[in-house]
Amino acid sequence: MTRVADIDDDEAPTVLIVDNNQMAQHRLTTIFRQKEFKVISCEDGDKAVDEYIRLDPELVIMSLDIPSLDGHLAALEMREHGGECRILFIAPKHQAELAADATFSAGAIGWIEKPVTTASIDALWSRVLGEVPAAPGLEDLDEIHPGAGELKVSIEEDDGPLPLVDLVSLPNLNLPHIGVSPVQMAKKAKKKSSKVKRLLIVFTLFGVLGAAGFLAWKRGLIPL
């Protein structure tokens, strides 16, 4: 799910917040709305990459522990896409080493310990406005995440029209409908249905006549 905060200024910078923790999302949304950012938020790494490509936001605030694609890999895919991708990781204290490694690998501008506060954002604000670091992890992206950057849905090439097949020459094919129009098929079906009905009437008539004859013979009306 993607949510957009209610900032109407088209010139306002955009921040993409990626976290599946609702409380963290709410806190970050409040902080950046106060800074007059347009806030887009989502909850998983795959969606975050799609939204980054679609929006080209000025800033990405991303948790490392998110579904579908972790924050580190999502950040590398964003960096591979190009652009001035300013990424700020957020992580709990026990993930400090992981956050530091991911920050260096993905060329993020830094990381902030959860729970995030306005003061912790302000302390790194000079980095937000500064240059985007290099991302050495891009060299290993294909190894750690094969297929990164490729289309998620493969489109098969069109090989042209299918070859015509001579169905008449194929043996042992029971294809009575070949060359018959739907109208003709309907007429045949109707005729078949009428024949069945006539047969049923005849069988019923014979059954009635037979029963009547048997009763008459039993009552002595018909001599042997």
Image (spheres, rainbow, N blue to C red):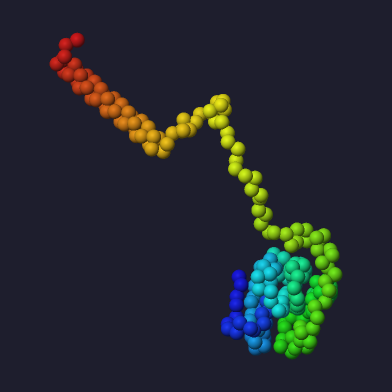
> In the displayed structure, would residue 191 be above or below residue 79?
above
Say whether residue 58 is visible.
Answer: yes
Q: Residue at x 72, y 79 (%)?
A: 59
> Residue 21's spot in the image, x, y percent?
67, 75
Q: Residue furthest left?
A: 221
> Residue 137's spot in the image, x, y percent?
83, 68
> In the displayed structure, would residue 205 be above or below residue 156?
above
Q: Residue at x 58, y 33 (%)?
A: 165
Q: Is residue 28 left or right of residue 169?
A: right
Q: Residue furthest front?
A: 160
> In the displayed structure, would residue 207 be above or below residue 59?
above
Say whether residue 70 is visible.
Answer: no
131 and 65: which is toward the camera: 131
Residue 129, picture quadrant: bottom right
Q: Residue furthest top?
A: 224
The quadrant of the picture occupied by the N terminus is: bottom right
Q: Residue at x 74, y 68 (%)?
A: 81
Residue 139, picture quadrant: bottom right
> In the displayed structure, would residue 66 be above or below residue 189?
below
> Residue 58's spot in the image, x, y percent?
71, 79
Q: Residue at x 36, y 34 (%)?
A: 187
Q: Is residue 80 left or right of residue 42?
A: right
> Residue 194's spot in the image, x, y percent?
31, 31
176 and 112: which is toward the camera: 176
